[in-house]
Every structure is written in C-alpha cells, then in structure tokens.
Image (cartoon, rainbow, N blue to C red):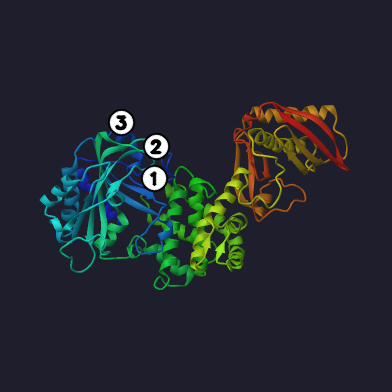
Amino acid sequence: MRKVKTRQELIKLYIDYFKRQGHHHIPSSSLIPENDPTVLFTTAGMHPLVPYLQGMKHPLGKRLVNVQKCIRTGDIDEVGDEVHLTFFEMLGNWSLAGYWKEEAIKFSFEFLTKVLDIPISKLGVSCFKGDENADKDTESAKIWESLGIPKDRIVFLGKEDNWWGPAGEFGPCGPDTEMFYYAGKKPPKKFEPEDDNWIEIGNDVLMEYVKMRGGKYEKAKQKNVDFGGGVERTIAVLNGIRDVFQTSIFAPIIEEIEEISGKKYKGNEKAFRIITDHLRASVFILGDERGIKPSNLGQGYVLRRLIRRAIRYGKILGMQDKFCGKIAKIIVKEYPDYQELERNHKFVIEQLDEEEERFSLTLEKGLKKFNELAEDRLLSGKEAFLLFQSYGFPIEMTEELADEKGIKVDLEEYNEEFKRHQDLSRTASSGMFKSGLADDSEATRKLHTATHLLNEVLRRVLGKEVKQKGSNINPERLRFDFNFSRKLTGEEIKKIEKLVQEKIDEGLEVRMEEMLLKDALNSGAQAEFGAKYPELVSVYTIWGRGGKGWFSKEICTGPHVNNTKELGRFKIIKEESAAAGVRRIKAVVE
C-alpha cells in the first residue's frame, strides 16, 4: 500500500488521476454557501455545484474534480475522539449528466487500488437496500462484484447509512455506495459494518432523485455522480494510523499546543483534539473571503461556540495569554494553498484575540456560577440562560458541563427564555441595564436609531459636554433627556432638526459589534451617564459616507434599522425642562 505522508501529496495524486480521466480541476469554494440558504456552511463539494446538478451547463463541461474545504456542525459534540472533525477537506469528482454508475465505481476502484495501492482484500462496500421512495441498488453491487469485491464484502443498508442529501431541505439526492478499509491486521471474510475496524474512505453518491419542497421524491431529469472522500481520514488509513490527529496534517498544531501548555498529547488527548479541531475550523471560517465574525446568530454563533469551547479546554490544560492566535499562526502556515488565509490572517488573529480576551473575563466566574447552580440534579432553563446572558456560555457548553456532572438541563425552559430574549431584542449583554424601549416594532426601531442621531447632533450643535441623561421610546415618539443649562432657541431646534435629517437622507449604514467595555469607551463610543454596564457590551455605529469614519457610536442593546434612509422625516415636537440642568426633547419620524 502506498505510504502517502502529506495532504498535498494525496491531493496531487487525486487531482492528477481524474485529470487523466478527462475531468477539469475547479477551485475550492467559500465555506459560506451561495446557492443554499437552508444551511449555514458548505458541507460537501457539491454545494457550489447545485445549479449545475439541477441542469445548468458548467463552463468546464460535465466532468469536474477538486478538493473542497467543508464544515459540518452536527458532530461538534463528538469531537474529542479519534476520528470526528468539524472542518475537513473533501476530495470530489463529479459527472453532470455524463457517465453513470459503472464508470463512477470503476474510477473510485481504480484510484483506491491502482493509485493508492490498497489491496482488494482490505476493501468492503455498502449499497442502498431500498425503501418506499427508491429501489434497491443491485446495479452498483453487481459492478463492485465484477471488479473483484466478493459478495460477502458487499452489504445493503438503509437510508440512514446509504442515502445522500439533499444538502438542505430539498434538491438533488439519491442512493450512495460507500467504500470501507479494514484497519485491523487480518481482514475477515465478511464485511460487518458494526466492526469498528472497517473505516469509510470514500462514497459515490448517485443522484437520480430530487426531493421536492413538499417532501415527495421524484426521479431526476438529470442524473449526476458525486464522489466524496475525506483527506484527513485517507491519510490516516494509508499510514496505518487510527487517530487522525496523529497524522502529519495535525502534527505542527499538536506540537504548538504542547509547547504552549507544557503538557503532552498522550494523556490529554480529548483537550488537544478539541483545541486542534475547533481552532482549525475557526481559522478557516474567519479566513473565508465572506468575513464571518463571532456573534450570537447563524454562522457567527457556530464560530463563537467553536472558539469558546477551545478556550475552555485550553484553560483546562493551563494555557494562558491569547493562545488561540498563536495556534492560528501555525494553522495558516500549514495551508499555503488556501491563499485567503494569508490575505486575511490579521483579521483572523484579531478576532481570535478579541474573543479569547472577551470570554476569558467571564469564563472563570461563569464556571464558579455553574458549580453553584449545579448542586441540584436539574439545571433550570432560566439558570442556563443566565449563564448564556451574563457569562457568554453557549447552551451547548452548559449542556456539556452538566453532562460531566451527570445532571440535566431544562432545554424547553431555556428555549422559552431565549425566545423571549430575542423578542425583546436583547443581546448577550442586555438585561444588565435598561434600554428605554417599549417594544421591538419597526416604528420603535426607527425612533431608536433617530435617538442616536439626535444624541450626536446635540453634541455637535450645543457642545461636546452634552451627555445623555435618559431616554424612553415607544412606537409613537422618542423622548431624550440631556444635560444643558437653558432652554433651546428656535434657531437651535431648526439646526438640530436639519442636521439629523441630512444624516437620514445620506443613507448611512448602521452596524453592531460586541466589545469589551473599556475598548468601547476608548474607541469613542458614547455611554449613558451613570449607567452600569457589563464587561462585554454591544456598540452600534452609524458610519459616515465616503470613508469619513463614523458619525455616531454608542453602547446600546438595540434594536436598530440597517440604514438611516429607512427613517423618513424627523421632527422635534417639544423641547422642555426635565429637571434642574436637564432638558428634554420629544420627537417623531414620519
């Protein structure tokens, strides 16, 4: 069997072989899917090809090959064992309405046995056994048998094992036939899928069906073939290694963790594997050209969950001083073929450093609070939500901590709390201070953004010493209190109205980001006088046009519109005294 040591060597062997079979090499696509809004990440090489799998003609023809970077989030909790990965590279070759089962299986067989020199005696395959939606795939089984795979090494399995797709809720799908390698010393006569010595190394998806929006399966007008094979797993198999983290792919990362932590991989495997996998995945998400940041929504939430789980296990190993960024530099260096990582490496390191600093501030306190709450056998949803809201613990981390102590989390109550939190448009830092909002209607969002404009305009018209003293917003009007020693003149009111309206008409972008409180204040963000803020805050910035920097920047819990042009016409309806040295403005947007 051929000893392929590096990922670069395997990828070259694979691409070159399929080029000889008339396939055109296409580049790896973004991790953020462009053609499928139903999934967060690119989970397979076929994702970027969806339009072509559905009938659109590819400019390079019907035969394609590549290696695709992928993220799969379903197994995050399993990472820590010998084989599970969140980020991985997938070898892929496709036929778009071209060759079908016989050629596809022959190509896979020849690559494994002729190029990689894997003995036939070490191979087993599985095929689809059929169900109410699709027939039993006896055709694939006969092809494998004709190539020399004995009948005892061919098994038929159900949809949970031998059916692929669709990638989202609907689209191309079909039965697949999977290839397995026996990792033990002497392969048995019969292929038993339950035997852990049989390791999957490849999968030919035979897309002859389409799942419709209503859930019905129909025969596809265009038949396609999609082969997928994991780079990391194949390297492990070819080198007789059971633990993928012990391959050359991960060696530099493991060595860096050993250097930083002062501990060895052996005896600390779970922590090392989680840190290695999660930070590698995080580097690729951050380094992607579509620029994902850690957040509490969508891809950003998955990213935050990965980084924070890595941080937690880093602390278990005793790692300090922004270790995520140090490890990230090694990862970027190990993947020179993904040039976007080098182009975006400063952003990658900055985001990891910020997230690590942000979470490290609350992790120890949060763990202490968890241990206090975990004295009972059940952690309530409200308690789990407290850990999320006040200490930044993703619910999955709380579940993992609870599982380690043998207790349960009331997820139903947590979800109710989280939904209520969303309905009130609170962020992870909200609930610690009042936002002054009556509800989360469109009208209220507009008035809230108008309040930010008003706050900055008051400082520019009346003087920088003006500070917010309070606010109240409902769907009908905004009320804003600020320190000022006298009644405003009619001319001043008109000037304030005019400048606010100018900024509305300019169509300025409104953005939110989370920052450490000290960083927010140092950046010039305005804060309500006398309010007590948590260590981590949300900052809303209204950006000036033409590269002029920001116009308004405030610590705030939201919600806001995305662009000031959504506000309409701004009008001050009343200016009055609220208290000694405090004035009050009431205004509307129409």
Relative height, residue 348 to residue 378 (above, below): above
Q: Quadrant of the N terminus?
A: bottom left
Which mark is first along the chain, 3 or 1? 1
Q: Which mark is residue 106?
A: none
* Three-letter residue code for mark 1: Thr
- SS type, badge 3: loop
Q: Which mark is residue 42?
A: 1
Between residue 264 and residue 38, name the one nearer to us.
Answer: 38
* Three-letter residue code for mark 3: Met
Q: Residue tagged by mark 3?
A: 56
Callouts 2 and 3 close, C-beta under 8 Å: no
User: Where does the image place residue 375, in percent across and percent down from the top left?
Assistant: 59, 69
Relative height, residue 511 to residue 153 (above, below): above
Q: CA distance from mark 1 to mark 2?
A: 10 Å
In-image side of 429 versus 30 (left or right): right
- SS type, badge 1: loop
User: Where does the image place residue 14, in percent across and percent down from the top left?
Assistant: 24, 50
Q: CA distance from mark 1 to mark 3?
A: 20 Å
